Image (cartoon, rainbow, N blue to C red):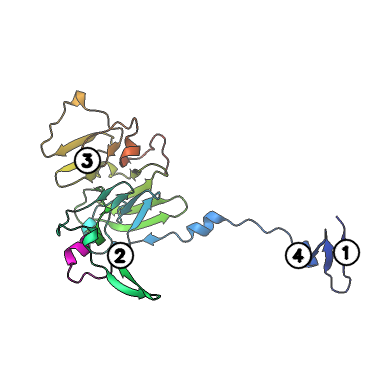
Amino acid sequence: MSSTINARTGKVLSVAGLDVPAALCAQTARPAIDRRAVVERHNPVLGAFDGRSPLSVGNGEFAFTADLTGLQTFPALYDQQMPLCTLSQWGWHTVPNPSGKGPSDLRLAMFDTYGRKVGYASSSEGQVPLFNWLRENPHRLHLGKIGFPIEKPGDVTAARQTLDLWTGTLRSEFQWNGQRVVVETACHPKLDLLAVRVRGRVAGELRVSVRLGRHERCRLEPSGKASEQGSGQRRQPAGDRPRARRRCVLGRNCLADGRGNEARRAASVCVAAGGRWPGFRV
């Protein structure tokens, strides 16, 4: 490739027919940006319970918001500001319509738009029940609360929680009963599945509780065994119960052994006291 350089200005007059400064040609390649370091320097860190700023994990289709323990142990601290919720794209709910009327009955407020009247649903005057119902429904359904059986927030001390923005993993460290506990919370990148790893000498005492509703709940033991409780349920004999394999399907009042497409049809929670889960890494 030929080039012509102007001796007075030091500029390359042409390189393959293009005008390029000589200084630019002499520059050496700069080192590549460490993108992970750039992202991780913005990792949010919490050191105390704050009802306005809980951290979440998710994959765009499923989301889980946690408190300082890495789960939803103390939802009451957040209910009035930023509630701790487990939400999905498929979980929606509509409350009964108190007005008995439908969208076509809503009176629109008329505004002049370039010489013509256009109606907007912007006024509730004289139609508050219908207006509020249309505004609030349908809404995403909170699938269930997952937390530790810790009695009060004051029992959690020396806490530090970090959301790794690069991996999407929430790491929560705190002292409970005089012992250090480490909780790692992550969401599967494709499935509606939440994974939690609990480490520490007292990990065996922190039984994870899944509350599905007033009369439905499923408790998972750190060993991987699961027990069911609920209104009107009949406990199966030990030999007839399905194997839980550290998994309980949210939205169903039953146990699942992890085979088939349970995780694709409903949200799941995977719990382990140390170690790893087959096919899932944090």
Q: How many marks?
A: 4
On residue 219, which mark appears?
A: 3
Q: Amino acid at mark 4?
A: Leu
| Disc 4 to disc 2: CB gap under 8 Å | no
Measured from the top left, where is residue 108 in percent x and y?
26, 68
In the rendered image, which quarter is residue 1 located in? bottom right
The residue to which callout 2 is attached is 52
Which type of secondary structure does the marked residue at label 1 adopt?
Answer: strand
Measured from the top left, where is residue 57 in percent x and y?
37, 51
Looking at the image, is mark 4 or mark 2 earlier in the sequence? 4
Q: Is residue 124 magenta?
A: yes
Estimate how packed mark 1 is, as few (under 14), some (14 to 19) or many (20 or more) residues with alpha carbons within 10 Å: few
CA–CA distance in space, label 3 to label 2: 28 Å
Q: Going 38% across and 41% down the picture, which residue do you hit?
A: 191
Q: Going 36% across and 56% down the picture, which residue do you hit?
A: 161
Which stretch did the figure color magenta?
Answer: 121-133
Which type of secondary structure does the marked residue at label 3 adopt?
Answer: strand
**Can residue 180 be seen?**
no
Indicate which label's residue lies in the foreground, 4 or 3. Answer: 4
